[in-house]
Amino acid sequence: MMIGVGLTLPAQNLNVFNARRASFKCQKSPLNPTSRRHVSSTSSTELTRETLSNLEKLLQKSNQPDPERVVKTSTSNGLIETKGKGLLEGLNLSRIWPEIKAAEEMSPRHLNRLQRLLSKTMEYSPRNNLGSRWREYHGCNDWSGLLDPLDENLRREVVRYGEFVQAAYHGFHSNPAMSTDEAPLPRHVALPDRSYKVTKSLYTTSSVGLPKWVDDVAPDLGWMTQRSSWIGYVAVCDDKREIHRMGRRDIVIALRGTATCMEWAENFRAQLDQIPESDDPTQRVERGFLSLHKTRGAHVPSLAESVVEEVQRLIEMYKGEPLSITITGHSLGAALSLLVADEISSCTPHVPPVAMFSFGGPRVGNKGFVERLNKKNVKVLRIVNNQDLITKVPGVFIGEKAQQQQKEDNPWTYSHVGTELRVDTKMSPYLKPNVDIACCHDLEAYLHLVDGYLSSKCPFRSNAKRSLAKLLHDQGSNVKQLYTHKALSLNLERDRFSFPMPSCLPSPSQ
C-alpha cells in the first residue's frame, strides 16, 4: 500500500497523509450493519437480511407525514437545494425499486391524493375520440387485443356503461312501489351521462306469487312482495358532440339486479326450459329468468315486449344513421340482458350491432343458447370477480370440472356466454383480502376493480382515479382500516356519507 501511495503523492506530503489516515474512522451507516469492512466472518445473505431489517426500522420511524412542504430553491452557484425532504425522499428508493414507487403512490401517506379519492368531487378525464374504431370497442372482434393489458378507452367505456346500471338502481330505490290499480307514471332517471336521454321505462313481472299467509304474517313488506317492478330503461344518445366522439348514435338498455322477494323467488327456479321462439329443443334457458322476461303485468307489458317495441321505434326514427345497441346489467340484470339481446337481435331485418356488458352475471342457459347468440352475432363482455359466487351459479353444485366435461353433450348443463374480463378483489390495495360475499358482488366494487385493472401481470394500477367515496359508503366494513382511519384524520367522518349519495359517480380511466 505504501508503494501505491508513494506513486500518487509527493514525498513532502506523505507524512501528513499517513497521520490523517491513521486517525480516520469509518462512520457507521444506519443502513449498513457493519462499521468496518470485516465481511469475511459474515455471509452476504446475513448482511442483506440485517440491512433490510434496518431499512424497515427507518421506514417505520419515518411513517409520520412531514407537515413541512418540499420547496426547491436555486442557490447562488446554480444548484437546486431541496428543503423539507424526509429521509425516504432523500434516499429516492423509487429509482432503485419501482415497486416502492407504486406502493408509495397508493399509500395513505399521500394525504392530498387520498383526500381526492375520498371526495365526492369527481375528477373527469378526457374521453378519447373512438371514431372509426368504435366497432372494435363495441366487440366486433370479441375485444381481441384490448383486454390484457386493458385498453384505456375500453376501460372508460366499460365503467361508463356500469354507471348506467347504477342509475337504474338509483331510479328504482328512489320510488320502488308500484300501484296495483293503475298504470305507472313516467319515471325520472338521473343519468350519469347528460348526452343521453331516457326514452322508455322497463318493467319485469313474476309469474309466481307468495302465499296469502305471508301478507298476514308480514303485512308491511309492501313493494318487496309486488309482482311487477321497474327494472331499468332505454336511453339514446342525443348530443351531436358525443355522437361524433363515439362514431355513431348509441342506444343503451340498462337493467338493475335483484331487489324484490318475487325476483329472488324467480332466481331459484333453476330448471332449463326451451326458448319459446326456438324450434331447437336443445336451446334452453333458466325458467325463472325466462319468466321475468316474458310475463306481462296487470298494467305493464312484459320486458320482452317493451324492449322490442322501443328498439324498433328508435331504429326507424334514426334510420340512415350509424347506430349501435348496447345492453348492460348487473346480477339479475346481466341475466335478463342476455335474453333481451337474443330478443332484439332479430326484431327487424337490419338490426344495428348488438353488444352487452355484463357485471357479475350468473349463467343463463345451456350450450345451445350460447350457440344461438353466436349465430346472431351478439357480442358479450362478461366482467367477472374471482371471488363472486353469483357468477358460478346455476350449476355450481355438480362441480366446475364436471360441467366442462358434460357441456359438449349434455343439454341440461349451464354454460357462460361471451368473452371474459376477470378482476380480483384481493388485488385492490383498498379492500380487505377477506371481504364478505356482498362486497364481492357489489357493483361499485366491480367498477372500482375495473378502473384499477391494468393487466393480468399488474392487476391494479397505481394511478387509478375512481373516487372511493361511494365504496366507503357502501362497503365501509370491507375497506382496509388503514384507509378508513386516514379518512377520519382528514375530517371525512363516516357521517358525511350517511346521507343518500348519487348512484352514478363518473370514473375516469386515464
Image: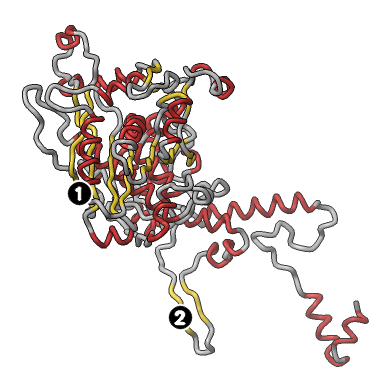
**What's the mark number on residue 317?**
1
Query: Which image quadrant for residue 10?
Result: bottom right
| Image quadrant containing the C terminus | bottom left
Tell me if residue 228 comes above or below residue 252 in the rendering.
above
> Residue 137 vs residue 277: left or right?
right
Q: Residue furthest right?
A: 3
Which circle's residue, 2 or 1, is located before the other in the chain?
Answer: 2
The amino acid pointed to by label 2 is Thr
Query: Which image quadrant for residue 215?
Result: top left
Residue 77: percent from left, percent from top: 54, 89
| Image quadrant containing the N terminus | bottom right
Residue 94: percent from left, percent from top: 57, 61
**What's the mark number on residue 73?**
2
Residue 163: percent from left, percent from top: 30, 45
Tell me if residue 436 comes above or below residue 21 in the rendering.
above
SS of the residue at dot 2? strand
Residue 72: percent from left, percent from top: 46, 77
Q: Residue at x 47, y 73 (%)?
A: 83
> Residue 120 vs residue 383: left or right?
left
Tell me if I can see residue 471 in this picture: yes
